[in-house]
Amino acid sequence: MTVLCQWCGAPNPDDREVCLRCSSRLLVVSGTNGEFSEETLEEEGWFAYDREKRRYVATWFFSNGVTGSFDVELLPDGIRLLSRELVNYEAGTRARLLFQRRPEGDVTMNVDLAAPGKDFVPWLVSALKKK
């Protein structure tokens, strides 16, 4: 089985923990015979107003054990969350979440990750559709 690096896209043997090309820690190892299956990632988050910092902050918990504290930016059409570092993950990895409301009432969530010392790359896109 081949595992694709989520940072650079390079193929790696399934027994590797870090990418052969960019040395980033491989996040997801799933699928069989080179065919990858979709994984379910559940998350739960809380928003609060930090009176000392005079801004909104958030804490997000993912079902894979990763946690992050985020600065919150309120946008006209959504909310952007930016972490300094994730907990229970490769040291120095950052996350950026963007929740946007679409004109038709749907909400999209984009999650981007940045390996230590690297730029953000898309990692997950999700949508909540209005019935």
Image: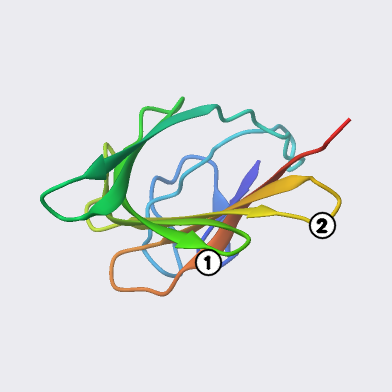
**Furthest residue in direction left, as rendered:** 52
- x 29%, y 73%: residue: 117
Q: Tell me where residue 22 appears, x and y as whole percent.
A: 41, 69
Label 1 to label 2, Cα distance in Å? 26 Å
Residue 42 placement, left or right of 102: left
Residue 60, picture quadrant = top left
Query: What kind of residue is marked 1?
Result: Val
Residue 66, picture quadrant = top left
5 and 41: which is toward the camera = 41
Q: Residues within 10 Å of mark 1 (few under 14, many from 20)?
A: some
Residue 113 placement, left or right of 116: right
Q: State the quadrant of the C terminus.
A: top right
Q: Secondary structure at mark 2?
A: loop
Q: Tell me where residue 57 appears, x and y as whole percent.
A: 30, 47
Q: Which mark is residue 121?
A: 1
**Residue labelled with disc 2:** 103
Residue 76 placement, left or right of 82: right
- x 65%, y 31%: residue: 39
